[in-house]
Amino acid sequence: MTRTQFAKDEILFREGDAADGVFRLIRGSVDVLRELDGDSILLGSVGAGQSIGEMGVIEDRPRSATVRAATEVEAEFFNPIEFLDQIANSPPAARDLIQRLSRRLREADDRIVDDERRSNAAKHNRNKTSEQAVVLASARVHLGAKSPRLQRQFHAPLMLGDLPFVVGRRPVAGEAPPLREPDLILDDTAPFRLSRNHFIIERRDGGDHVRDLCSTLGTIVNGEPIGDHFRADHAPLRAGDNEVIAGGVDSPFAFSVFIA
């Protein structure tokens, strides 16, 4: 393990680099970005006490995003062997990693089950487009549009009587259909900020959550980024109003999720 420092705006690693180790932030914060048609899209920030880059090491794949120092940063750097040794000798770290891998495996299993259900029977009471939303007066969860661009696609809040509820983008010509059939299908134009399956609102562990569905640009829930590039792929929803942004910090796909 080596300790290193980065000045503000210095790059820790770039999208496409080999995953040669893991950074654990001791001080400061970093921004996570992805390139989209030549533009850098800010997906979210990671602060002190968190690690960045571990899934690339575990999965032996190139970096999926660029990480840039948002402030002056002090970090510990672990090469792959050191990182795996740390996991082996730290039950909390091992438990956290196992939970992340388990969530990814469960997500893959959920997709298989969903595909099987779609092939055996048509879904009932599902929103195929925003105009076909089923409005139930007894619904606890309300989904609304916060940004003007999104408000042009659906005007009135949707009352979600049936969870889980998937939000995604309409495929364009030449694209394969999504693995899940979205309950709310939205239009987007290239470069796409919204994935065909982007996020799901679901009931789990006695509460309501938003889970990112391995989207390209991630999801932000009440300021917390989730998805493949971050520590978790889900975040809890609190009672009252919640902000959910799909596709980066400045994405036009900004939603309000109200929990009654």
Image (cartoon, rainbow, N blue to C red):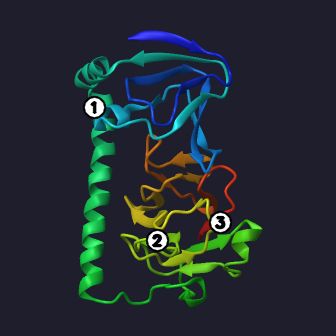
**Residue carrying label 2:** 166
Point 38% across, 32% down: residue: 54
Mark 2 vs mark 3: which is more N-terminal?
2
81, 202: nearer the viewer: 81
Q: Secondary structure at mark 1?
A: helix
Amino acid at the residue labelled 3:
Ser
Of circles 2 and 3, which is in front? 2
Amino acid at the residue labelled 2:
Val
**Residue carrying label 1:** 94
Point 29% across, 38% down: residue: 59
Asked if the residues shown at circle 2 and circle 3 are in contact, with their CB atoms under 8 angstroms apart, the answer is no
* Percent of width and height locating residue 75: 51, 17
Check disc 3: other Cα within 10 Å, few if <14, some if 14-19, many if 20+: many
* Percent of width and height locating residue 220: 58, 52
Q: Seen from this angle, which residue lies furthest front?
A: 174
Left or right for 227, reference 70: left
Of circles 1 and 2, which is in front? 2
Left or right for 183, reference 109: right
* Percent of width and height locating residue 23: 45, 23
Left or right for 27, reference 229: right
**Residue carrying label 3:** 256
| Quadrant (top left, top right, bottom left, bottom right) of the C terminus | bottom right
Mark 3 vs mark 1: which is more N-terminal?
1
Point 72% across, 74% down: residue: 151
Q: Secondary structure at mark 3?
A: strand
